[in-house]
Structure formats: C-alpha cells, structure tokens
Image (cartoon, grey):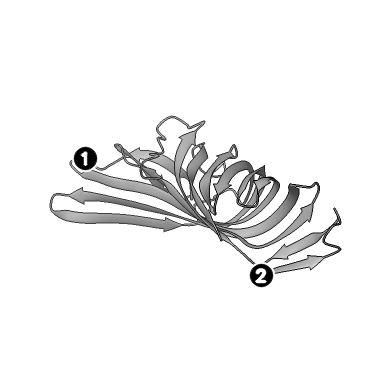
Amino acid sequence: MTLKVGKNNSRSTVEVNLSSSLSFGFIGGINQAEGVSIDMGQSFEIEWGDVISSKVRVGKKDFMRIGMGFDWRNYRVTDFKMFSKDERGIISMQDYPEGTEPKFSRIHTFSLSFPLKYYHYFNKKVYFAVGPELYFTPWGSLKTRYYEGDEKRKITAGNVHQSRFSVGVGAEVIVHHVGIYYKYNPFNVLRTSYGPKFSTMTVGLKVAF
C-alpha cells in the first residue's frame, strides 16, 4: 500500500510505503582477530526489510528512501576454535575440549535496521540502490555444539555484549522484484572490551514485494 503526499508531477512527492522485502545472504568475516574464522558457507543473514518506508522523489527516475526492518544474523566458526564466555562476561576463542569432535560455534544477533538509500530506476521493473544502513542490536546469544564420544554437548549463553549501534553500507540490483545485494559492515560485531574483533560483509539474494 502506498500513500502519496503532493502532486504526481512534483519532484517533492513523498510516498509512505507499507511494503517489504525479504533477503537471505551469506556472511564472511573481515578484519578478524587471531583465532576468529567466520565460515561464509555456514554464516548467514535473514532480513525482513522496509516493513515501513518513506520515499522522496529527487529526479525523474531517482528517489531517496528511508526504511525500517528486522535483521537476524548467525556468525559461525566451524574449525577447531569455539566462542567461549567466562564468568566476567568476556567472549574469547578457545580450543574445544580434548577428545571431542566440533560441530559448530556461533554468535547470533537480532537487529532493527534503518537503511537510507538512493534509488535509480532504469525502468519500472529494474533499479539500483545504494546507501548507508544504521543498525540497533538489542539482543545477542552464543551457542556451541560438539560431540563427546556418542554424546551431544551444547553450551549456550546470552548477553554477548554485541555492539548496540553500528553503521554499514549496502547496495542492490533488482530486476522484476528479484535481485542481488551486498553489505559491508566495518563495525565490530562484539564490543571490543568484551570480545574478539571481527566485522563482516554479506552477499545474497533479495525479493522485493
């Protein structure tokens, strides 16, 4: 649903959109501290974007758009290191217990996303968008799974001291509602006083409704 404010032929036309997009992408680690190796094959993002957004025309085929959405991310390491939280709340990379078989160790976060993007439409169904994205991340958790003989072991923890606020940049190309997107997030996922440094990039598919 779209609500328009202003004349149709006016460059100051404002549209409030109650539409959305759904994205799935693979996350790769960058600027990683020693011992951190985010596995892009198993680290992923799911985003329900532009749940509500506002779009302002700035040219014949150009718009500025600000939106709000929800973002879930899993950062997995699958080698012989695991995320571990001690009694002080410090997150570090540790070896798995001796004689065990690793499965995975991951940090999971939930964020509210606020993208501000410039859109250029080549025609009604093909467009390109790029711009900064602000994230507010109120929640994060840790989970590690491994095998000890025939027994499955699980370690979980909450309050992983994720960075509450971060800013990245995103770009996307959409053709007939389906396209690809890329994100670069230079901020550390965890607060540096509580966890190892690592930031991320994401590549994936987007469906715009």
Q: Give the image location of residue 44, x and y in percent.
A: 43, 48
Q: Is residue 145 left or right of residue 140?
A: left
Q: Which of marks 2 and 1 is nearer the N terminus?
A: 2
Q: Label 1 crowding class (10 Å Cα cut-off): few <14, some 14-19, many 20+?
A: few
Q: Which residue is drawn at 60% across and 41% down?
A: 171
Q: In this view, does 18 lie above or below 95?
A: below
Q: Give the image location of residue 83, x and y in percent.
A: 39, 44
Quarter of the picture containing the C terminus is bottom right
Badges 2 and 1: C-beta atoms under 8 Å apart? no
Q: Label 2 crowding class (10 Å Cα cut-off): few <14, some 14-19, many 20+?
A: few
Indicate the amino acid at tag 1: Glu
Q: Which residue is drawn at 75% across and 49% down?
A: 63
Q: Name the residue under label 2.
A: 1
Closer to us: 31 or 115 = 115
Measure the alpha-carbon separation of dots 2 and 1.
57 Å
Q: Is residue 74 shown to the viewer in this render? A: no
Closer to us: 122 or 187 = 122
Q: Is residue 36 shown to the viewer in this render? A: yes
Indicate the amino acid at tag 2: Met
Residue 108's mark? none
Q: Mark 1 points at which residue?
A: 98
Q: Which residue is drawn at 29% across and 37% down?
A: 80
What kind of element bears circle 1?
loop
Q: Give the image location of residue 85, x and y in percent.
A: 42, 49
Q: How many marks?
A: 2
Q: Is residue 71 above or below residue 184?
A: below
Q: Give the image location of residue 119, x and y in percent.
A: 69, 46
